[in-house]
């Protein structure tokens, strides 16, 4: 039977401190090694706009800073504590004007493999 897996924010927090303007860092904690159904992790952004074609259902929780999602041209401004749900099939941009930290959860867990995606901006190659 599977057991809980604990991930420590303190293990990756240095990546936020080191993140240069225009940068993003994604740490996918829950992936196919951990779950058979869903994925999730943390995304650090610093004064950046990252365009993406959203091919999964996604939930974002804003932990720190102000996060903005542009979805099909419509802006959604999110502050710490806000939760945002996005259905798959949208053209989006993940944006912030300063540093921000978001937690994301997506379904399905193997979306990258299903779509043949081998690179995602900000993810270390070892986490692909």
Image (spheres, rainbow, N blue to C red):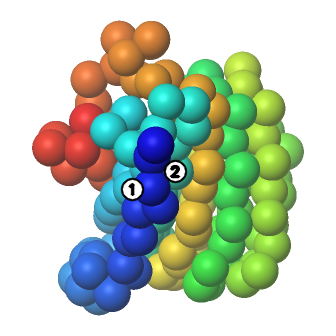
Local packing at callout 2 (Cα closer than 10 Å; few below 14, some 14-19, many 20+) is many
Q: Is residue 118 above or below residue 58?
A: above
- Location of the C terminus (image quadrant): top left
Q: Secondary structure at mark 2?
A: strand
* Structural distance between the alpha carbons of marks 1 and 2: 6 Å
Q: Which residue lies under the disc numbered 2?
A: 40
Residue sitting at 45 percent across and 24 percent down? 110
The image position of residue 15, as x and y in percent, is 26, 77
> Is residue 43 visible from the viewing direction of this image?
no
The image position of residue 106, as x and y in percent, is 61, 40
Q: Secondary structure at mark 1?
A: strand
Q: Which image quadrant is residue 66 in? A: bottom right
Q: Is residue 59 left or right of residue 36?
A: right
Residue sitting at 81 percent across and 48 percent down? 85
Which label number is shown at residue 115?
A: none
Q: Is residue 108 above or below residue 28?
A: above
In the rendered structure, are the residues bearing label 1 and label 2 in contact, judged by CB atoms less than 8 Å apart?
Answer: yes
The image position of residue 91, as x and y in percent, is 67, 29
Q: Which image quadrant is residue 16 in? A: bottom left
Q: Is residue 57 above or below residue 118?
A: below
Residue sitting at 63 percent across and 32 percent down? 107
Q: Earlier in the sequence, mark 1 or mark 2?
A: 1
Q: Is residue 120 left or right of residue 70?
A: left
> Is residue 93 visible from the viewing direction of this image?
yes
Which label number is shown at residue 29?
A: 1
The image position of residue 40, as x and y in percent, is 52, 51
């Amino acid at each position: 039977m599977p057991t809980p897996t604990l991930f420590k924010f303190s293990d990756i927090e240095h990546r936020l401190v080191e993140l240069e303007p225009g940068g993003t860092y994604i740490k996918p904690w829950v992936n196919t090694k951990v779950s058979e159904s869903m994925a999730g992790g943390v995304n650090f952004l610093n004064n950046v706009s990252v365009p993406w074609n959203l091919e999964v259902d996604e939930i974002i929780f804003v932990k720190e800073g102000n996060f903005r999602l542009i979805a099909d041209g419509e802006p959604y401004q999110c502050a710490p504590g806000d939760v945002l749900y996005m259905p798959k099939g949208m053209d989006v941009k993940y944006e912030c004007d300063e540093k921000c930290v978001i937690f994301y959860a997506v379904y399905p867990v193997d979306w990258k493999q299903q779509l043949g995606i081998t690179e995602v901006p900000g993810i270390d190659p070892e986490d692909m």
